[in-house]
Image (cartoon, rainbow, N blue to C red):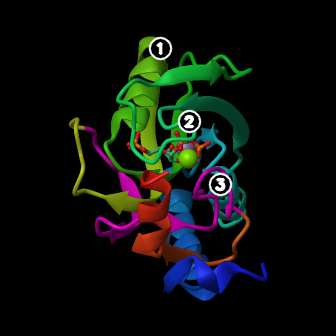
Amino acid sequence: NDNINSIIDHKLFTEDDIHKMCVKLGKQLTQDYAGKQPLVVGALKGAVFFLTDLVREMNVKEEIDFLDVSSYGNELESSGKVDLISDLQTDVKNRDVLIVEDIVDTGLTLKYVKDLLKKRGAKSVKCCVLLNKETNRRTDVEIEYYGSKVGNEFVVGYGLDFMNFYRNLRFIGVLKPEVIASLKNN
Ligand code: PRP
Ligand code: MN
Ligand code: MG
């Protein structure tokens, strides 16, 4: 990433910070799901990076599936309306479901997914999110597990995108305010 310094204000979490959060959450989940066969559900696309690292820290007999939901599209702010773009392949009835997300912001995406899977008869529906941004919460949704809280900053990397770019950064950084501003002036 040759031009990354021109858009990143500072690093918020290094690769090592992220690894430590995955290890810690993985240990906790290993205990809490002992003897169960959870279905780990990732929300495309942001959760992919976190999910693959997290499940490798979980010593649990688990299955993985994905769904694609989107409330942002290419926009910087949530539209408030969540679309199911592609569904799971697994029947969640009577399953212990663990939803994995990169970030919870307004909470609308997670709330939608949780409600959907409960409605389909899952035995339990919990979530594990890497970043918990509480400042813009627009709905009441329980976050059973999270890695860290974050403030009201635009974060990118490790799955988190800016206009669909920068998901592949190994760290999580804060976008320079002027990068967002220049886009809004377009
Ligand atoms: C982002 C992020 C979460 C959601 C959080 O996904 O990955 O899924 O927004 O925002 P919320 O709490 O306000 O709903 P996005 O819709 O941008 O899709 P993506 O994962 O493909 O980037
Ligand atoms: Mn997402
Ligand atoms: Mg996004």
x 65%, y 30%: residue: 67
**Residue nearest the observer in this picture, 124 or 109:** 109
Q: Which residue is mark 1?
A: 121
Examine the image and state in which quarter residue 38 appears. top right
Q: Which residue is mark 2?
A: 73
x 68%, y 23%: residue: 88
Q: Is residue 123 visible?
A: no
Measured as percent of width and height from the top left, residue 163 is found at 61, 51
Rounded to the nearest angstrom, the CA distance separating label 1 from label 3 is 23 Å
Q: Which residue is mark 3?
A: 51
Q: Is mark 2 within 8 Å of ligand 1?
A: yes
Q: Is residue 183 above or below residue 171?
A: above
Q: Secondary structure at mark 3?
A: helix
Q: Quadrant of ligand 2?
A: top right
Measured as percent of width and height from the top left, residue 55 is found at 68, 57
Say whether disc 1 or disc 3 marks the residue closer to the N-terminus.
3
Rounded to the nearest angstrom, the CA distance separating label 2 from label 3 is 21 Å
Residue segment shown in magenta: 141-167
x 49%, y 12%: residue: 120
> Which one is in front in this view, the residue at disc 1 or the one at disc 3?
3
Examine the image and state in which quarter residue 116 appears. top left
Pointer 1 with pointer 3, Cβ within 8 A:
no
Q: Is residue 178 above or below residue 128?
A: below
> Which one is in front in this view, the residue at disc 1 or the one at disc 2?
2
Would residue 53 be found to the left or right of residue 84 on screen?
right
Say whether disc 1 or disc 2 marks the residue closer to the N-terminus.
2
> Which one is in front in this view, the residue at disc 2 or the one at disc 3?
2
Q: Is residue 124 magenta?
A: no
Pointer 1 with pointer 2, Cβ within 8 A:
no
> Which amino acid type corresponds to the residue marked 1 in the rendered image?
Gly
> Which amino acid type corresponds to the residue marked 3 in the rendered image?
Leu
Measured as percent of width and height from the top left, residue 157 is found at 61, 68
